[in-house]
Image (tube, grey):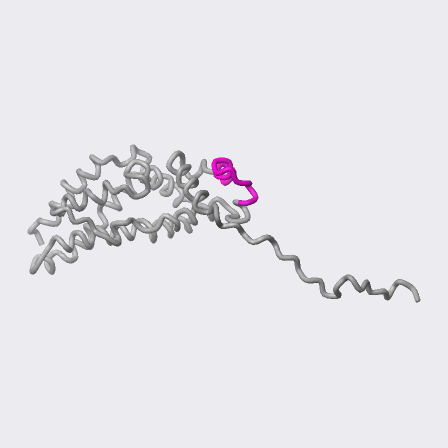
């Protein structure tokens, strides 16, 4: 009998597909934190996955197996930061103005300067990635709008609350909108003085105005 019809008994007729190594997620927090550090230092366009790998001491292949593109990595970093802590616990300083400024001065993401730098990079990323734009709206912009809406609503009582309800919905968007505009305009990033002016010269006067 020739070898043409021979079946090797040590080889399965239907070979089982080899399973790849399971993805190691133990370094995810370090990698995503390092990605945010780099976003605080440079624009999204200049960020590379290779640079994140070098900063964390991880092999590039490790990152690319986990996040195939830079967009995927940044989306994971956005998701990992979570909502602003004030979303779950509103400031209670004793005055609306101080409460609004407490949100602006929050230590979230390392404090206002680092947070502003990260948001500036993410703002530039939203121009080239609709996925990142949606993530920033869902994870950052909309939670901030809700925080300001609740603070403004809490400060208004009785008949004033009903009278100012529609105004509050609009004013809750003012600080995030003006911040986004400044970050995307190419001018100087918004400073604390900028936000104080928005609170003192726009939000509070408009909230307390008796003009219908």
* Residue in view at x 44 percent, y 38 percent: 45
Above or below for 16 versus 67:
below
Seen in the image, is 201 located left or right of residue 10?
left
* Residue in view at x 17 percent, y 46 percent: 99
Q: Is residue 84 covered in magenta? A: no
Seen in the image, is 31 located left or right of residue 209?
right
Q: What x and y, as percent, mark residue 197?
A: 17, 38
Dominant secondary structure (helix, strand or loop) of the stretch shown in magenta: helix
* Residue in view at x 13 percent, y 46 percent: 204
Seen in the image, is 43 located left or right of residue 48?
left
- Quadrant that contains the N terminus: bottom right
Q: What x and y, as percent, mark residue 109?
A: 32, 42
Give the residues in magenta: 49-62
Could you tell me how many numbered marks the image carries?
0
Q: What x and y, as percent, mark residue 165?
A: 15, 58
Residue 166: image quadrant is bottom left
Extreme top residue here? 188
Above or below for 12 versus 119:
below
Q: Is residue 54 covered in magenta? A: yes
- Quadrant that contains the C terminus: bottom left
Above or below for 113 versus 157:
above
Above or below for 143 versus 198:
below
Q: What x and y, as percent, mark residue 205?
A: 11, 45
């Amino acid at each position: 009998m020739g070898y043409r019809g021979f079946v090797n008994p040590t080889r399965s007729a239907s070979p089982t597909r080899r399973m790849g190594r399971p993805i190691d997620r133990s370094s995810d927090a370090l990698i995503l934190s390092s990605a945010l550090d780099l976003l605080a230092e440079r624009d999204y366009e200049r960020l590379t996955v290779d640079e994140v790998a070098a900063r964390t001491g991880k092999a590039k292949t490790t990152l690319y197996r986990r996040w195939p593109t830079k967009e995927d990595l940044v989306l994971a970093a956005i998701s990992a930061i979570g909502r602003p802590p004030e979303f779950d616990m509103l400031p209670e300083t004793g005055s609306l103005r101080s409460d609004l400024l407490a949100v602006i001065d929050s230590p979230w993401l390392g404090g206002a300067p680092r947070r502003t730098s990260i948001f500036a990079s993410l703002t530039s990323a939203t121009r080239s990635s609709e996925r990142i734009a949606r993530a920033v709206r869902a994870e950052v912009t909309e939670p901030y709008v809700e925080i300001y809406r609740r603070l403004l609503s809490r400060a208004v009582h009785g008949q004033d609350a009903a009278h100012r309800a529609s105004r509050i919905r609009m004013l809750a968007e003012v600080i995030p909108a003006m911040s986004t505009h400044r970050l995307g305009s190419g001018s100087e990033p918004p400073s604390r003085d900028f936000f104080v002016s928005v609170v003192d010269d726009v939000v509070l006067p408009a909230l307390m105005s008796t003009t219908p």
